[in-house]
Amino acid sequence: MMRGIGAGMVVAVMTRSSRSRTMRVAGRIATLDACADRDEILRLLGQHEFPSELELALSLALLRTFAVPSISTVLAEAKGFTDDPMKRYDDTSLLLNEVMEGGLDGERSRAATRRINEMHAGYDIHNDDMLFVLSTFVFDPARFVARHGWRRFTEHEEAAGWEFWRAVGKRMGIREIPIDREEFRAWSTRYADERIRPAATNEIIAEAALSPLLRFVPKPLHRVVWEAIWVLLDDDLTRVACDGAPPRPVVRATVLAVMDARRLVVRHLFRERRRPYVQSNRRRMTYPTGYEISELGTFPSPRRTSSARVRADVNRAT
């Protein structure tokens, strides 16, 4: 009898919590315009609905880009990941979050975009490579949340993400961004099939990028961590291009079971955040007392290439 009452109470709590989530933040998002209110929708998703999921999704998205030799070669030349991977990770995370958190026309977002443009202007980066990185920001978060989040993005939310990142791409001087989202998705798929290939620089950058995480893990467990990452990324093409071993069935099953359990707990037992979780406010090992946007990233010697000049012009305009 008591067992039945206890089970009933759990079900009631789970149902009540799930309903309160749906009626609050998601309901607020549904009233906003996917184009005009794109910044606010991204803020609500990142600071209330999916703060942990989006941070992990964007990190995995960047890992996919390391599997493109032309991209990993530029990153190896910049030496940020190989010389000080913890700083490079923090800088990348902070710059992305500064762009997203205050709205694209906010002072800090504009400053972060300028800093990103200054970094890129020092290297001869092909426009298609920039487009591909942009596409991972558009599509990978929604894909990851669909697999591991407490709910999926709505079509409305995906459209807002598309509008947001397309605007970011324009401010970065990226050319030939498709007008249609599905056209961009198809382009990104073709690019990955054609350009993701094994290369020594892929492995160097991937290993360097993950080294801050591995420093806290006993060496015998390093392989398990790598396998868990490949399970979450769910992209064998990228794994092979970075010379990663396929996850063992037991590791795959364990990781997916943990993520499934987490999804159910967050969906049914956690209420949405009333206070925003601001990623840029999180204490970072690299900047224990705070940071200035102007300090973030790498500082290459400028190269006078046509692509660099385009980004430099956009940088001055913003």
Image: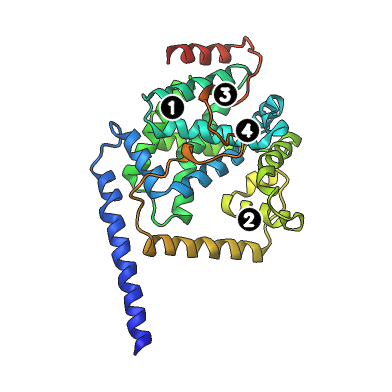
- The tag on residue 295 is 3
Q: Residue at x 68, y 25 (%)?
A: 78
Residue 191 appears in the rendering: no
Q: Residue at x 52, y 28 (%)?
A: 131
Q: What's the CA distance linking mark 3 and mark 1?
A: 21 Å
The answer to whether residue 109 is above or below residue 233 is above
Q: Are marks 3 and 1 in contact (CB under 8 Å)?
A: no
Tell me if mark 4 has few (under 14), some (14-19) or many (20+) residues whose alpha carbon lies within 10 angstroms of its own. Answer: many
Q: Secondary structure at mark 1?
A: helix
Coordinates of residue 116 in the picture (x, y in percent):
53, 23
Name the foreground residue: 3 vs 27.
3
Mark 4 or mark 1, earlier in chain: 4
- The tag on residue 168 is 1
- The tag on residue 228 is 2
Colouring mode (rainbow / by chain / secondary structure / one colour) = rainbow
Q: What's the CA distance linking mark 2 and mark 4?
A: 22 Å
Q: Secondary structure at mark 4?
A: helix
Q: Quadrant of residue 295?
A: top right
Kindly identify which residue carries mark 4. Answer: 88
Residue 68 appears in the rendering: yes
Question: Please, what is the three-letter code of the amino acid marked with disc 4?
Answer: Arg
Coordinates of residue 76 in the picture (x, y in percent):
71, 29
Number of the front mark, 4 or 1: 4
Mark 3 or mark 1, earlier in chain: 1
Q: What's the CA distance linking mark 2 and mark 3?
A: 33 Å
Q: Quadrant of residue 179?
A: top left
Coordinates of residue 168 in the picture (x, y in percent):
43, 27
Question: Please, what is the three-letter code of the amino acid marked with disc 1?
Answer: Val
